[in-house]
Image (cartoon, rainbow, N blue to C red):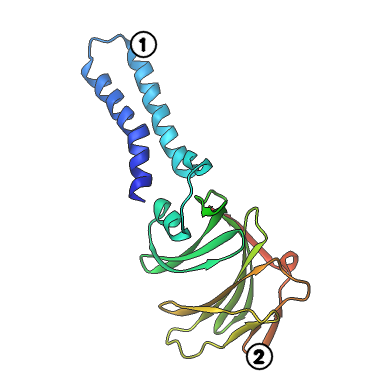
Amino acid sequence: MVLFSTIRIVLFGAPLIALLRKYYRNKKAKRRRKSVAVLMAIAAFALLIVSEIFPPESLFLSFPTPEQAFRYQSIGSIETVIIGDDSAFVYYRASESVSSEAIPRRGAGWGIALPPNYSSKTETISYAPLVSLSVYNPNGTDDYYIEVFQSDPLHKRSVTVTDSNGSQFGRLLQKYSVVDYTVLKGLPEGYQVIIGDKMVPVTWEDMKELPSIP
């Protein structure tokens, strides 16, 4: 993240500061020259903001691991990384909350995530305790990350999670909840997630769609 910010400061921040200093020091400059300087400063600031959202180096920059790709662009403590065929899914902690980000595979390495990061759908299984099933699909891939969220403040009530594919589920303990996760290459017909003794059919078209994640 430090390198990501430094590149933007060098490319856009330094010229912006130089233009503003010239604008304020050159009091004898004509109004037109001052207007041009202000417009150039505004343009540099706008480019700085756009480059934060759509980094141009994403077109050529690659990293050996998804962890390095994540740390280049984002801030947070990585909890776990799930590797798919065409992407990786990073769970990371920022302050007290756990968030997620999809990292695209770039050839033999890993690239920078661009918005929208992934599409997601969810289904509430129960409300007391709260249990939900979510599916995340990084754009342009056939990777589907399955996540089961269980509200469990004491980490004593959560049930075992499996699926009809015999997938290996990982488990992430949060402060007041438990998250079980796995990844599939495509969603097979008739696929089900088994949460305790409850079998939940998973069909992408039938689940509630959530906004794309930036």
Labels 1 and 2: the sequence-earlier one: 1
Residue 111 drawn above or below residue 204: above
Asked whether, in this view, residue 34 is left or right of residue 162, the answer is left
Amino acid type, label 2: Asp
Q: How far from the left and from the top, in percent, is residue 140?
A: 65, 53
* Residue ID for mark 1: 32
In this view, the mark in front (1 or 2) = 2
Residue 179 drawn above or below residue 34: below
* CB under 8 Å between discs 1 and 2: no
Q: How far from the left and from the top, in percent, is residue 5?
A: 35, 44
Amino acid type, label 1: Arg
User: Residue at the location (44% across, 68% down)?
Assistant: 98
State the SS at label 2. Answer: loop
* Marker disc for residue 195: none
State the SS at label 1. Answer: helix
In this view of the protein, which residue sits in the foreground, 86 or 158?
86
User: Residue at the location (46% across, 52% down)?
Assistant: 63
Residue 199 drawn above or below residue 7: below
**Callout 1 crowding tier (Cα within 10 Å): few <14, some 14–19, many ≥20:** few
* Residue ID for mark 2: 197
Residue 147 drawn above or below residue 42: below
User: Residue at the location (47% across, 64% down)?
Assistant: 99
In this view of the protein, which residue sits in the foreground, 183 or 175?
183
Asked whether, in this view, residue 188 is left or right of residue 101, the answer is right
